[in-house]
Image: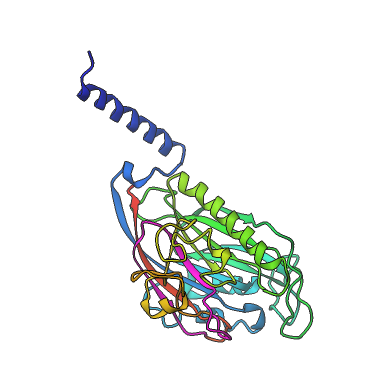
Amino acid sequence: MRTHSSRRRRALTAAAVVAGLLVAAGVAVPASAASTKQVELHVVQWNIEGGHDTRLQQIPNLAKGLAHRPDVLFIEEVCRSEVQQMHRLAYFKGWHFVYKTSQQSKPGTCAKATGISHPYQQGQVVASPHAMSAQHNYRLPGRTHKGEASAHGTPSPQRQFWLTCTNLAFSGVRGGSLRACGTHLRPGFNEPYEAPERLDETNAIRSITNGFRAQGQQVVLGGDFNTTPTGAAMNPIYQLDDKGTDHGAGHFVEADQNDKTYFGHDSACTSRYHCRSGEGTQIATPNKIDYVFYTAGATGVGGGRGPALNSDHYRLVSTAFLKLPRS
């Protein structure tokens, strides 16, 4: 007759074998299966409106006035020529970049990039001083956007929308434990399809990031979502519901959701501790449309905006602590 202790030893041995197989296959194992290391993560999200800066003056502003070197930069409306400039700046020496074009631009909007067949491009980038792996761009659903008027009053080229993701490596942390994803959702509130298709985009982001979570990965998600915290398109992302309880449809906590100064912006929220709100990030309005999210379980989450520095968006600067499995 097997005793309880012998059954328990067999179960623990089986669990260890499974964990070993997962690690060998390159799949991150949940932190509960191993000892953890606390990682302090510094994140900057900024739509730099790069297409309006043909003199490449915006990129040096990225790090201006920051208290910490970022572990992750999420940048939108960045020209391909500006990404090339980042490679040349001393501040970004040794950094890694994942860039995705969202639209072909034109002279007068972006400066000319070198060494590529379409030199006038604009898109989004995830950048980090930490080594990257498993980079991938996921096309989000919905029709190609007709484009907005450019600074010169002429129609912009059509745009596509993406989720750009990469694993980030940290010393002493098991590989594949943290995935960083940046996005830029469709703008506009006038066309009848725009708001519903933003919801389609965030549903797709939830599905993609749920896949990462199922593999034991934690996720940091940043971007210009082009909608306010209480908008329907944010329901698939926030762990908070409209009352401020942890019964939302999503699995993410946001950098500025604990700032009581802005709780009144969400009239339905009755929580004293966190609401779907935050300091405005759009220059022309009081609206918050830029975000940094962490998978639930992050601690010490905080954030606030920095100066605009020639963009029509403020920078969003955030810090959080993540417990990641040791290598």
Left or right of 126 in this view: 10: left
Q: Residue at x 76, y 68 (%)?
A: 158
Q: Say if the magenta span includes residue 285.
A: yes
Q: Nearer the viewer, residue 304 or 307?
A: 304
**Residue 9 x %, y %:** 25, 26
Please say if 129 is above or below 175. below
Q: Residue at x 48, y 71 (%)?
A: 92
Residue 310 visible in the current orientation: yes
**Residue 230 x %, y %:** 52, 69
Residue range highlighted in magenta: 282-308
Q: Nearer the viewer, residue 8 or 122?
A: 8
In which quadrant of the rendered view does residue 271 lie? bottom left
Left or right of 150 in this view: 269: left
Q: Residue at x 68, y 66 (%)?
A: 102
Screen quadrant of the N terminus? top left
Residue 134 visible in the current orientation: no
Q: Say if the magenta span includes residue 20.
A: no
Please say if 319 is above or below 211. below
Left or right of 189 in this view: 133: left
**Residue 75 x %, y %:** 55, 71
